[in-house]
Amino acid sequence: MALFITFEGIEGCGKSTQLCLVAEQLRQQGYGVLTTREPGGCAIAEQIRALLLHPDHDILVPKAELLLYAAARAQHVEQIIRPALQQGQLVLCDRFCDATLAYQGYARQLEIAAIEHLNHYACSGLQPDLTFWLDLPVHIGLQRARQRNEDDALQHEQRFEQQDRQFHEQVRQGYLQLHQQQPERILRIDATGTVAEVTKRIATLLTSRLHAAS
Ligand SMILES: Nc1ncnc2c1ncn2[C@@H]1O[C@H](COP(=O)(O)OP(=O)(O)O)[C@@H](O)[C@H]1O
Ligand SMILES: [Mg+2]
C-alpha cells in the first residue's frame, strides 16, 4: 500500500526514535516500508543537509536557507519518495514541507504564501497523506536533544539546537497553526511520557488510517 507519512515537531520531540519504531512495527505486519529524512534522504540532498546544519554557518541568510531546503526536497522527492510510492511502499519521512513552514515561515517569519508556493513547486504538488506532529513543551524537547547530543558526542548538527528557546516556541506555535488548518492530515500526538507510550499513541491512529485506506 502506498502512503506517504511524515513525522514533525520541534527538536528532541522524538521524531527519529518514533519513526524507527513505527517502521519496525509496520515491517512486522508485512508492509513494505521505506524510511527517509529531510533535509537529506539521497546523496545530493545529504550534501545540502551538511551545509544547512553546519554550526559555523550562522551567516546563512534566511532566503538562502529556504532555497537550499527546497533544492534538497526537489531531489529527494523525485529520486527517492515518488519512486517508492509508485512501487506501493509506505514511505516514512522524518520532517517534510510542514517543517519549512514552521521554521522558515512561522519562526523566521519569511512570507508563508511564498513558502507554500515553493514547497508545492519543489515537490510538484506531492503532499503527505498523513503527518504525525509530536507535540512536546520546548524545554523538554531541548533537554532530550541536549542529552542525546552529549550521548552521541555529536558536534556538527547542532545549529538548530543552539538557537534560543523563543525560536523553538515559535516553531511549536507554527506546528499548532498548521495542525489547526489541516486537522485531518496533521494529527497531534502528545509526545510526553515514555517512548513506548508515544509509540502506542501513534500506532493506534495509524492502524485506523491504514484500515481506512485499504
Ligand atoms: N518519550 C521519550 N522519553 C524520553 N526520552 C526520549 C523519548 N523519546 C525520545 N527520547 C530521547 O530523546 C532524544 C531525542 O529524541 P529524537 O528521536 O532524536 O528526537 P528528534 O528526532 O525529534 O529530534 C533521544 O536521545 C531519544 O532517545
Ligand atoms: Mg531526529
Image (spheres, rainbow, N blue to C red):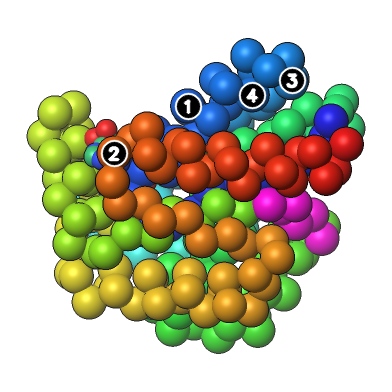
Q: Residue at x 18, y 37 (%)?
A: 149
Relative image position of residue 31 (x, y in whole percent):
74, 21
Image quadrant holding the C terminus, namely top right
**What is the spatial separation of the Cα atoms under label 1 and label 3, in whole angstroms?**
15 Å
Residue type at numbered disc 1 = Leu
x, y (%) of residue 4?
Answer: 73, 43
Calculate the distance from the C-alpha at mark 2 to the C-alpha at mark 3: 27 Å
* First of labels 2, 4 by sequence position: 4
The residue carrying mark 3 is 32
Q: Which residue is mark 1?
A: 21
Asked if residue 145 lies left or right of residue 41, the reply is left
User: What number is the disc on residue 26?
Assistant: 4
Mark 2 falls on what kind of element? loop
Q: Disc 2 marks which residue? A: 194
In the image, which residues are magenta?
A: 125-130
Q: Amino acid at mark 3?
A: Gly
**Vertical placement of residue 47 versus 53, above or below:** above
Residue type marked 2 = Thr
Q: Position of residue 128 (x, y in %)?
A: 71, 53
